[in-house]
Each structure stands twice: as structure tokens, then as C-alpha cells.
Image (cartoon, coloured by chain):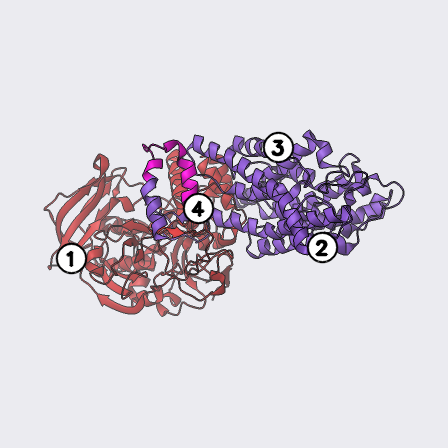
Amino acid sequence: MKALQKFMDKVRPNFQKGGKYQYLHSTFDAFDTFLFVPGHVTKKGSHIRDGVDLKRTMFLVVIAAMPALLFGMWNVGYQHFLNINETATFMETFFYGFLKVLPLVIVSYVVGLGVEFIFAQSRGHEVNEGYLVSGFLIPLIIPVSTPLWMVGLATIFAVIIGKEVFGGTGMNIVNPALLARAFLFFAYPSQLSGDKVWIAEQVDGTTGATPLGNLLTATDKLPPLPSVMESFIGTIPGSVGETSTLAILLGAGILLFTGIASWRVMLSVFAGGYLMGLVFNLIGANAYMTLPAHMHLLIGGFAFGAVFMATDPVSASQTNRGKYIYGFLIGLMAVLIRVVNPAYPEGMMLAILLMNVFAPLIDHYVVAGNIKRRLNRMKKIAA
Amino acid sequence: MSTITTIKKGLDIKLVGDAEKTITEVLAKRIALKPTDFTGVFPKLLVKEGDKVKAGTPIFFDKYRDNIVFTSPLSGEVTEIKRGAKRKLLEIIIKADSKSESLDFGVADPTKLNKESVTEKLLKSGLWSMIKQRPYTVIANPEAKPKAIFVSGFDNAPLGPDYDFILHGKGEAFQAGLDALTKLTEGKVNVNIHSDQTKTKVLLNSKNVQVNEFKGKYPSGMVGPQIAALNPINKGEVVWVVNPQDVINIGQLFLTGKVCSEKIIAITGSEVLKPRYIKTSAGVCLNDILQDNVSDVEKRFISGNPLTGSQVEATGFLGAYDHQITVLPEGTDQRFLGWIMPNLDQYSYYKSMFSWLTPNKKYKLDTNMKGGERAFVVTGKFEEVFPFDIYPMQLIKAVMAEDIDMMEQLGIYEVEAEDFALIEFISTSKIEIQSVMHNGLEFLRKEMS
């Protein structure tokens, strides 16, 4: 460690102002602070500081998403071998999926971080950790067969339009990872829906539709659906990381225990979705409406969106009361879009993006309540 | 007695180096008056190097409020006048002599005086400068009519001094000080105590004042949350705030007619070999009281507590409003992969480190930032440690944007920079929030005057 530290100390001046590699300052700084928490000290105000920084916070989200990724890798293999009607050992299954998913992760990180580094450098900022999370989530919410160039293109779009134009991490309006998916969804719809994209190296003539896809085409009675257990464990077709509610709940446990994600948002998303499902059960006008409410929470990207996407603190409501409203409306909208809109099988992405846009408005009205309370106090005194 | 107000939000940070309850008397050899301690004061000097002064001799006054003078706490000789950039007056250093001569301001019974004569006595003796006004934390305006006066009788900041211990046996002077303060407001003088920990009769038997009981974690001992819980400040209102030790010194002025500069200060922090209390003078030189009572590592000297104090040199002086010296290790070490390591020696409010496993452990924290500065990302955490009916993040952002209307609407008058200390501590974005708030309040004060 000492040697590494000495080496970094030695090369550091080259990257600082006036050094010969000054144009790589942000890049060097990113690696430097990755290796060593800098020796910067407080100047005034609070002389001591909490041990946790944004790097640690962000990295914990990545750890929390790890079960979903690992299960997703296994499930990619499982779906593939199921499709070609072969049996494979656990390791073969996992390794197959690993090789399919890894390129997605690599492309997402390399392209996204590349853009981040360029922007940080041109602005003279430190590289922000936000993309550690976005880059990890993007591969988890797309079908495994998405061409790599599309992943790269969507990532560039999401980082630049979703984040950097607003000033970088912490300034964005909508969730960048979801924006990447939305970009793909609208630019290349055939790659993001239908029954040909969810299984790697699918055999021609077979169908690999997701439960949501099946439900959308159902007319008078519910199509055959995976059991509650299958949907909960996640042995169903779908985007890489979204199928296993169990793996997602493991991550949710980490996020909630460490307090990184807001339980208010998570709880109210599930509540909103469940309630909307119940309302549709009551109406029961078509087959889809009769789908048991709890199934809505288990299939598709509902759980993943609720745990990892809706809880993004930057794009969510910032006030506690606002978080309940924001989450509830996401759950409600997601199920509403699924059931009522014939064009989109999955409503979660659109519901979250929509509420991202409305989050500041919700906050505005919540804060206005506080302001009004203060004004009333003034009036009472004046009277 | 009154009902107990529980302040639910807050955080107790347990640190190594609480002062042991023994008092050592150390005569101050050198003391300094630091005009920079007084926000908004434009100092005009009344002495020059070499002048002989007595306790109570005016040293400088405020150019814009010339009745506010600052006096020497003891007798001696002005040895040095330190100036900074643009000749800004930094320190007026006075070397103590052994004569301890004082100017006589006249003995008086404050209960028999009216507001004008109490005010005049305090102004002349220089003790008026110990009365602070909120909002803005500036020296009180003698003509103003404060809604109330607040004295917090306990300090539960990390390593904060124990006022039960400090005030012991000073009931007479404390009561005389309170009597003087009651003359200054048409409202009440509030003495705020801790419902379980305050035991001293000095506080419990305070007369002619409102005694309020509080409990809860830090910052329940700070006047900010106390005022917010009892009677929040509205636009246009002012309240005054005095520290209990300054109440005693005000009382002494009326009892003896002399300026009393005695202060019991807590010497705390992990780098102090024998943390304890020291009886000395206001503005004392750190060198005189610490001497060889500190460790050999690179150190940070703080006048005040680790959360709200100000950094001073090893040869610097105690701040005018401080009752504590804290010495912490300077955190210049780089930590390998520190952002992911378990870091069992680190304290964190969050459960993503492991300090929640050892809730009673006392930590030895250094001054490292523990991360780079970032934009605000995490939400909902500030509210958990901020005991005000205010949205802190929104207010901080309004201050950053210098949006005065928004600042007022969100309750800027109810808070001071120091009330944001815990928020600054737990912020994962490592933004200097107290500085932001201080600058914002200064901006507001200048715009509104």
C-alpha cells in the first residue's frame, strides 16, 4: 500500500494544474480517489465528518443490485436451455448467462464512464459516482439480446441528455438508467418488446413472450401464466435483472437497512400498484382486469422499478410527504398503463419517468404547506 | 414546574476526550480580543501598542454603533495589534500584569434599576457584547425590544462542557445576572435546562424567570431548537441569547462593580492528555492553558466544540463566545480504498458503516473530509437530525440561490449557521453547509438593513 501511495504521490503533480497531463486531471483524480480517500481536511464549520461519502453510498446500491444481476445471469442461461430443450448443470447455466450479460455491463460502463470523464474533464470537476449505479442498472432492465451498439447508443443518450445537460449527478430530472431504456423502447421498439427478444439465441418458431406480453394479447380469458412461486423466484422470461422478485427483495433489504433507499417510496409504490390491481379486479371488464392484484407486483419490472428506480433520490420527490404521493402514483400509473394502454406491455418505466417529471411539483405543494403554516403563525401574531 | 419539551430529532456523536470534572486554575499570561469573533462589527481601535489598560478599559468600538465598546478583561499592557490582509484588525493582544486593576462601574442592585440604566452599565463595561441577537447572531441592538431572552443551561454537543459543574456555587451572581436581563425585555427571560441531567440549584432555583425543561439528543441543548420549540422567531422579531457563564459575569458586574473576566473552560478532545476544566480568563492564549497537555501528532486546535467551533492556531486565543477548547488529530492521512473498507474506527450516522454495532463506543475522529465534494444526492436524511419545522435542503438551496423571498418563506429567521452543524456532519456530499448558511445570513442581513 505504501508503495502504491508513494507512486500516486509521485505522479500526481503531472496531472495537476501546470502538469504535462493536465488535460487528464479529472480522470487521474477519479482513479486516485478510488484508490485512496484523499487527505483533504475540513476548514471551518463542522471539523469532524461522517465516515460515509457518496462513493460508498453509490457502491452499496451496486452491491444491493448484485443478487438481481447474478440471478439474471443464471436465468438467461436457464431460459436458453429451456428453449433449446437441453439440460445443463447449474454452472453451465450460469456461465452461459454470464457470457451473455457481461458484454452488456462492460459496454454500459465503458461508454457511460467515458462520457462522464469527458464532461468532468471539460468542466474541471471531479468525476461523479452517480454513473456507478446507472451503469449497473442499464444492463439489468433491457432484454439480453439487445445489440451492444444499441446499448452504447442508449447509454450515450441517457448520460448526455438525461444528466450532463442538467449539470451532472444530482441535477438530473429523470432517472438516467430508465431514460436509456426509454430511448431503446421508442427508437427500436422491436428490440424491446414482442416474443423474440427475451431469450438468448432463441430457436426460430418458438415463443419467448413475457407474462406481460401474453396478458396484453389476451381477450376474454387470462392466458396461462407462471405460478406465483415462479414469478417470485424469477424463472420466467424478461429483462435481465427484473424477473426475480426474491433477488430484488434481497437488494431492497440492503437498501432499506442502510437507509439509502426511502422505505416511503418503496412501500407506497407497492401499495399503489396493489390498490390499482384491486380496483381493476372490481371493475373486471376484460380478462386483464381480472389478474390477481398481487401478480402485478411479481411480474414484469414492477418490483425492480419500485426498489431500484423509483427510489433514486435525485429524481424522486425530496420531501417525506411527497415521497408517499410520488411512490403511490408510480404504482398506480404502472398498473394503469399495463392494463389500459394496448401499446405498452410494461407500464413501470413510463410511470416512473412520468412521476420523475412531476416530483418537483409534488415537492412544491408539500413545501407550500410548510410555508403556509409559517404565514399563519405570523398572521396570528399580527391579529 | 413547567412541562418537558422533548426534542426528538438529533444525534449524539460520542467522542474520546470528555473533560474530567476537576478544575485547575491557570492565570492567563496573554489574552486577546478578536474583532473577527463579532459578526458585523467594524472595529475602531481606542488603544495602541504599549498602552497600559485595566480590566474594563475600552479597547475598540463598533464604527457603526459607537455605543458598543469592547473592553479589556484584565489589567496589563497592549503588546501587539495584529492585522491581516487590507489591514483588517485580527487580534489585540494584551499581556497580563500582576496588579489586576479594574475600572469601577459602580455596585448596583439590578432589581432596583430600570432598563436604561442596566443597558448603560452593560454598554460601558463592554459586557453588552455578550448579548447576542437572533436572527443573524450579531451583538444585540440596545434600542431593540426583544421578544424574549434565552439562556441554555446545558450543552450536549459532542465533548460539550457540563454547565452543572461550571455553575456550581455561583448562584448569587447568576441570579443577579438574570435580574439584570429581565429588565431588558418586556417578554420573558427563559432559562432552559435538561429535564434529567440538570441538577444544580443555581439553575433550578432561578427566580423571576421562566424555567423550561428539555430532553433529547444534541442539538436539544442549543438555543436554536429550544427557541423553535417554544416560540419560533417570525420575520421582524428578535430574541436575545446569553451564555450562562456570561450571565454570571453580568451578575458580577452588578455585585462588585467590576468587569469579571473569569471563565471556566473545558479542555477536551482525543489529543488532550488530561482533558479537564480550567479556570482562567476570557480570550486566554491556548499556549498558556494547554502547554504540554497535548499529544505529539499533527493537531487541529478548535475554540469551541468539534461541530461549531472555529479553528485557531496552537498559539491562538479562545474566542469571545467560546467556553471550550477541543484538540483533534488533523486528518491528512489517505485511506486506501477507504470508501469501501469496513472502517471500524470510523463513526457514521448511516448503517452503511458499522458504527451502529457499537452504539456506546467513543470514537477518536480526525478532521478528514472523508470524501470529495459532490452535489446533493441523498435526500430525507437532513430532516432526521434537524429539529425545526423547516425543510433544510430546500432552505439551503434557496440560500445558495440568494433567493430572499424563498429564504423568508422557508424560515430563515428561525435558524443560524450553527443549527446546521449536524447536517453538515452527516452530509454525504461534503458541502460546507455552515459556511453556506453563514454567508447567506450575512447576505440577508446586509440586504435588509
Q: Amino acid at mark 2?
A: Ile
Q: Nearer the viewer, residue B406 or B144?
A: B406
- Chain bearing tag 3 is A
Residue B351 appears left or right of A301: left
Q: Please give the residue where the numbered disc 2 appears in the rendered image.
A: A233
Report, in whole angstroms, how far the alpha carbon at label 4 lies from the one at label 1.
49 Å
Label 1: which secondary element = loop
Q: Position of residue B231 (x, y in %)?
A: 48, 52
Within 10 Å of the Cα at label 4, are there few (<14), some (14-19), or many (20+) other Cα atoms?
some
Query: Which dot, 3 or 4, sits closer to the camera?
Result: 3
To which residue does mark 4 refer?
A: A34
What chain does badge 4 belong to? A
Whether residue B259 is visible to the viewer of this picture, yes or no, is no
- Taking depth in this image into account, of B376 and A6 the one nearest to the observer is A6
Asked if the residue at tag 1 contacts the one at tag 4, i.e. Cβ–Cβ closer than 8 Å, the answer is: no
Please name the residue that numbered disc 3 is placed on: A149
Q: Residues within 10 Å of mark 1 (few under 14, many from 20)?
A: some
Q: Percent x, y for residue B72?
A: 19, 51
Q: Main secondary structure of the magenta part?
A: helix
Magenta region, residue range: A13-34
**Colour red belongs to chain:** B
Q: Secondary structure at mark 2?
A: helix
Tag 4 and tag 2 share a subunit:
yes
On the same chain, marks 1 and 2? The answer is: no
**Above-or-below relation of B385 to B213:** above
Q: Nearer the viewer, mark 4 or mark 1?
A: 4
Q: Which residue is mark 1?
A: B29
Rate crowding at label 3 as few (under 14), some (14 to 19) or many (20 or more) other CA atoms within 10 Å: few
Say which amino acid is labelled 1: Lys
